[in-house]
Image (cartoon, rainbow, N blue to C red):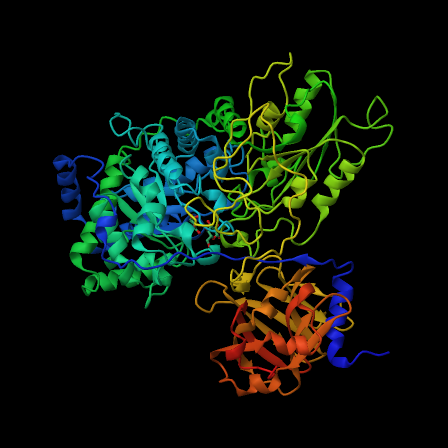
Amino acid sequence: MPLPRRKLLGVLFCSVILAGCKHEGLNRTETTTAANGTASEISVWPALPPALPADPALEARISGLMAQMSIEEKVGQLIQAEIKYTTPEDVRKYHLGSVLNGGGTYPDNNKFATPQDWLALSAAFFAASMDTSDGGVAIPIIWGSDAVHGHNNIVGATLFPHNIGLGAARDPDLIRRIGVATAREVAVTGIGWTFAPTVAVVRDDRWGRTYESYSEDPAVVQAYAEAMVKGLQGEKSDSDFLRGEHLVATAKHFVGDGGTMRGIDRGDNQVSESELAKVHGAGYLGALPAGVQTVMASFNSWRGEPLHGHSYLLTDVLKGQLGFDGFVVGDWNGHRFVPGCTVDSCAAAINAGLDMFMVPSDWKTLYENTLAQARRGEIRPERLDDAVRRILRVKIRAGLFERQRPLAGRSGVLGSAEHRAVAREAVRKSLVLLKNNNNLLPLSPAQSVLVAGDGAHNLSKQTGGWTISWQGTGNTREDFPGATTIFEGIQALVKAAGGEVVLSARGEFDSTTFTHGGRPDVAIVVFGEEPYAEWHGDLASLEYQLGSNSDLALLQALRKQGIPVVSIFLSGRPLWVNRELNASDAFVAAWLPGSEGAGVADVLFTGPEGGRPYGFSGTLPFSWPHYVHQTVLNPYHPDYEPLFPLGYGLRDGAESLVSNTLTEEGDTYPDGALEDAWLMVSRPRAPWKLLIVEEQQVPVAVAGNRSSSGPDTNITVAAIDRESQEDARQIRWKGLRPGAVWLAAERPQDLSHYLKERAALILDVRVDRKPEHPVRAGIACGPDCAAELPLQTALAKLQPGSWSTLSIDLQCFAAEGADFSRVSGALSIASEGALELAVANVKYVPGAADRAVISCGG
Ligand code: BGC
Ligand code: BGC
């Protein structure tokens, strides 16, 4: 029987893309903290004395320099431009205060630029800044780089475990030594400043930057912040503080970055001021007394007010109460979020207490505008002078005028054996043993070992984001000279002990694989998250592998053959892995260990003579969820029921009490815990993806910032800026054929709770070209199930060219046959003719059905 036409697109979509759909749960919730503080409780912040004693000689030197500087030169100091968009000639001409290299930027755009290339560029910038041929004052430039887990933008550097793994070690002295090693490697390239450490205290683990945080425990973050700053900068009392082999460090991102609602990167933190101070401020209480010289303002806002323009927090709290006398640098164009500001004009940020703009590409117009604002007094003269004084103070303290760089150009220091040994120690200490039934671990190396999983021999998965490229993607084996994969470490150890080891990512073997002709004695399966950075890593759900079951299937297949299974889980955060735990005899959280994968084998196996040189010592830096909805989970929480609590970690020989029958239902909700489901915020949130689906055409997955369907580009989806960078999508239908754009998931999601909780589908739309043909909104629920509603009239009523909010009662879709227990397409917009729409912020909001614009009286 032919299907009614209006169901066609949905069904087509399902059968083409969702072959083999399976019922799975998608759910999440969070508990919000009561926001009842007011922005005047400065006493909730401790009063800290300045970290360094007042130095009249230093201040006099600064005054002497400033007396000779023109207003142009002063404004130049406030600008930090990116090396892709700046030349030494620009630095000379505009007297720029700083440059940075963003993640994935290299001299001459060459990924394989040598340490000498980096050094030559930094020397050229330095020389330009000291050039006084135009009659100006010589002020050395400062170059900042994100050396956040080693000097991670440079091929060949030692890559330490990401911060979350270090948190498991609970070893501040190790952190200090990592700081020392990192500073040494950065110094080789002539760079004097790192944007580290991140001292975020994470609340919602769906945040894409969770791995940049040491722990959800403020005390761990505080101790580590202090240790890392001391390692990077040296001890305040030492003569080589900030000099020689040391760098200038940054405590970031001030403040509250780890506490945004729903873990949305760059979002709003709504906690009380006392929680802001006690939880999110903890890292600064470690970093500031240790003498950290710079603080980076955060992208997030606090109760709706962006930090880049927050004069109370930047000036009264940080520079006043907390005694900070260094300078505040902005984050990547972060000033544009301040009300009234744009990327190239923002007096308000400087007036609020920002000292240096991070303005990668648009620095020239920002410079011109800032200069005009300074001349007009829109930027207060004493504020301009204070910002310049702070920048010069740090530059003088760091010895930049003398440019003493004993390690510059000593390429042997980069990735040296000594530094790799520290990283390998850190890997050993970062491993957290979650399950070890029948004391399977440690393993004897003198046996036959099958190493499986796509993470076993995969340096990208091992090193994660902020590795050579910004997202940590696009790297191959050649990009990691000197590194070892987890497999290579196992292989070396097992071979040396006379055992046998075989690598098969898919866990395959036959009677010829091992010399004994039989099954392996044990399988070690390494799997986990793909690399990501910043908001690209934000998740809608903590469920691991929402989009597929491949790792679970691998574990189960090995188990079925009677092979004991050790899982090594690579991830930037705790994820809901009950199914994978059930299918493993032993389970190790290995986080993102970095370049020294061999550290994993050190702990998995006994020593060559049966001894145990290294045991498991890692303890959880984050609580591990028992249920998918436990996205905010920490001991300060009233209903704290983790699967594994903060600080958990089995030791050798300990009895493991983990059952093999943990709940495998993802969709268990306590009453009233259902939160808004954000399907698209800036970008689709996993597991949802944007697809263009047309009759007679292969569906197109929307990738990057522009995708089209068909040779005639009938439908185009482009990323556009609404309030911030690429936070909306514009969809254009030429109308050559009917077609739709879908927010789709590979595996159907159980959203039936939303129907029960009387939710509405809500989205922001702007009609850029009026619909003259039928338009429909749809839901798909597997290969044989779809529902559509007419949308043309509702769209035609909206004010063209301006944003409106559209809401549809989910009940209307249900009445048309949608089964919300298996949603494979959470929203489609199908048009039969030409149409242009911009769309942003798509979500299911519980309880909103009654207020929905499109209701169905049900
Ligand atoms: C990040 C910072 C980083 C900066 C420079 C920003 O997007 O938020 O952590 O230091 O870029 O790469
Ligand atoms: C840069 C990163 C930066 C990010 C912020 C990227 O292009 O490489 O360093 O953090 O943009 O948007």
Residue furthest to the top: 609
Q: Is residue 550 left or right of residue 795?
A: right
Q: Is residue 602 above or below residue 802?
A: above
Q: Is residue 847 left or right of residue 398?
A: right
Q: Position of residue 633 (x, y in %)?
A: 48, 48
Say which quadrant the C terminus sits in: bottom right
Q: Position of residue 662 (x, y in %)?
A: 64, 44
Image quadrant where residue 659 sits:
top right
Image quadrant where residue 656 sits:
top right
Q: Position of residue 842 (x, y in %)?
A: 55, 68
Q: Is residue 554 above or below residue 834?
A: above
Q: Nearer the viewer, residue 303 or 336?
A: 303
Q: How many numbered circles are shown?
A: 0
Asked if residue 168 shows in the view, the reply is: yes
Q: Is residue 456 left or right of residue 359?
A: right
| Residue at image coords 59%, 59% | 704
Q: Nearer the viewer, residue 412 or 424?
A: 424
Asked if residue 141 shows in the view, the reply is: no
Q: Nearer the viewer, residue 44 or 174?
A: 44
Q: Position of residue 197 (x, y in %)?
A: 39, 40
Q: Is residue 518 above or below residue 715?
A: above
Q: Is residue 729 above or below residue 358?
A: below
Q: Nearer the viewer, residue 562 or 364?
A: 562
Say which quadrant the N terminus sits in: bottom right
